[in-house]
Image (cartoon, rainbow, N blue to C red):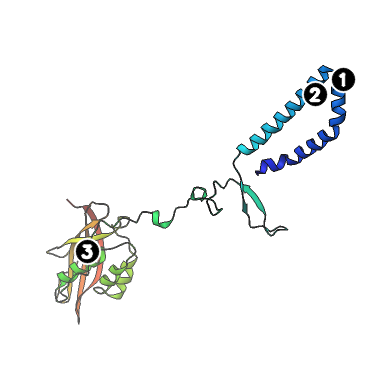
Amino acid sequence: MSYFNDSIKPLGILLFRYTRKRTGAGLRWAMRSPMRLAATAAVIVALAFGVHMLSKTGNDKPNAHPVASASATDDGLTWRQVEAGPLGADGQPTSDASPKTSGSASEKPSPASSVPAPSKPKVNRAKADSTAGAFLRSYLSRREGDDQWKQWSAELTNEQLADQLADAQTALDGRGDSTVTAVSVGKAPFTGAPKDTKIRWSRPVTATVTTETGQPIKITYEVTAMKGDKGWIVTDAVERGWTAAR
């Protein structure tokens, strides 16, 4: 029986006891006059109809299935009435009543980078221009979350310059993944650089870089290299500006 029917059950019992107790006296009083008899019958019919309508209204309401909460009572649980929906054959709420949650399987994966992954450039340490070009290819080819470019470029510089360049700002900041597609080396030392020697070399070097913004850019560095026991090594590199590549 529904929760609503349980709530009116005591009212029906009281009405039945009162009617049975007063039936004899009521009938004797009603039989004294036809008008009283008709009025008594009308009251009984009205009461019966009202009880019927109340019972019907309670049956029309959906059942509320008790769901246990976490707080303890005399029975060990506190019950609260919730609209749990229809029950299945096993007595449990059907899938329609289950809360809908979004799991990680419904989340869309991050799109792949539009920039090809960089690879470690080849270098001929016996030539200054090859060393300078390989240095810029390593330094400006980057992937988000991957610091491999630091290791590659550090192999072509001294320790002091590697530390400075690791945290230096560049024209690539905010452009996402990047890769160098071309490098051009100037034919003469940059303005203010001393003349070349057997162990010292200076040139402007420009790298064409493709980034996730979709617009390639050209970044120019003033590069200085020194020759040591293991060949040429970059000792200074200063960014002098960038332009949009055409």
Would you call the spot at circle 1 few (<14 residues within 10 Å), some (14-19), or many (20 or more)? few
Q: Estimate the spatial distance between the alpha carbons at disc 2 and disc 1, rounded to whole Å.
A: 12 Å
Marks 2 and 1, the one that precedes in the sequence: 1
Q: Where in the figure is residue 123, as x and y percent of width and height?
A: 17, 72
Q: Residue at x 21, y 61 (%)?
A: 180
The quadrant of the picture occupied by the N terminus is top right
The mark found on residue 40 in the picture is 2
Discs 3, 2 touching: Cβ within 8 Å: no
**Res 222 label:** 3
Q: Residue 176 is drawn in which quadrant?
A: bottom left
Examine the rendering and report whether any part of residue 81 can be seen. Answer: yes
Residue 229 placed where, x, y %?
A: 20, 82
Q: Secondary structure at mark 3?
A: strand
How many angstroms separate mark 3 from mark 2 (CA)?
Answer: 114 Å
Q: What residue is shown with label 1? A: 32
Which mark is drawn over residue 92? none
